[in-house]
Image (tube, rainbow, N blue to C red):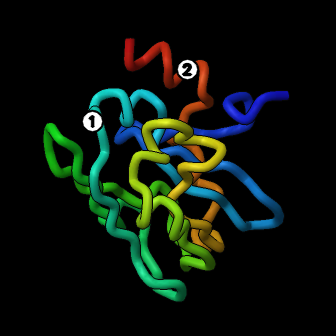
């Protein structure tokens, strides 16, 4: 099973991947990265920061534009990907494996997951 078969995507182009019980990796979809172009700057929150679903938690700048990144689920940041902050181009090269943004302990309820799309449905929607 590939990673894209296990992720859920938001309509604002973020993805979540379940690591273990209630802990998720959050990142940008390959479609979002493609639309942004060459990424030159990533700002991530501090470990311990809490966000509600839909809150802006990150800013990504590319040669084309700056974009706010929205938290697809409610949770508390448990880890940030410093590699992406130090080398933003990782997002362009590997948005799922190496270019993830944060890891989050999910504090919401399962209803928050219900409007997320599996990867195949997401790719159909963005065509």
Residue found at the far left of this picture: 65
Quickly name the residue at label 2. 121
- Residue at the image point whose x is 40% and y is 77% from the top: 45
Q: Quadrant of residue 75?
A: bottom right
Q: Residue at x 43, y 65 (%)?
A: 86
124 over 115 or under it: above or below: above
Q: Position of residue 67 (x, y in %)?
A: 22, 50
Q: Which of the two discs, 2 and 1, labels the residue nearer the N terminus?
A: 1
Q: Secondary structure at mark 1?
A: helix
Left or right of 106, for residue 62: left
Q: Secondary structure at mark 2?
A: helix
Q: Is residue 82 above or below residue 17?
A: below
What numbered label is drawn on residue 103?
A: none
* Mark 2 vs mark 1: in front: 1
Report which quarter residue 69 is drawn in.
bottom left
In the figure, 97 relative to 31: above or below? below
- Identified at 55% across, 53% down, the residue is 100
What residue does disc 1 label? 36
As rendered, which of 109 and 27 lies closer to the eye?
27
Q: Position of residue 49 (x, y in %)?
A: 46, 85
């Amino acid at each position: 099973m590939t990673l894209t078969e296990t992720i859920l995507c938001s309509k604002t182009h973020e993805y979540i991947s379940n690591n273990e019980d209630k802990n998720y990796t959050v990142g940008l979809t390959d479609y979002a990265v493609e639309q942004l172009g060459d990424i030159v700057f990533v700002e991530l929150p501090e470990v311990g920061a809490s966000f509600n679903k839909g809150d802006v938690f990150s800013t990504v700048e590319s040669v084309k534009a700056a974009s706010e990144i929205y938290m697809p689920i409610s949770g508390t940041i448990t880890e940030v990907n410093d590699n992406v902050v130090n080398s933003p181009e990782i997002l362009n090269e590997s948005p799922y494996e190496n270019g993830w943004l944060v890891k989050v302990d999910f504090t919401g309820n399962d209803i928050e997951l219900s409007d997320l799309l599996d990867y195949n449905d997401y790719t159909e929607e963005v065509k």
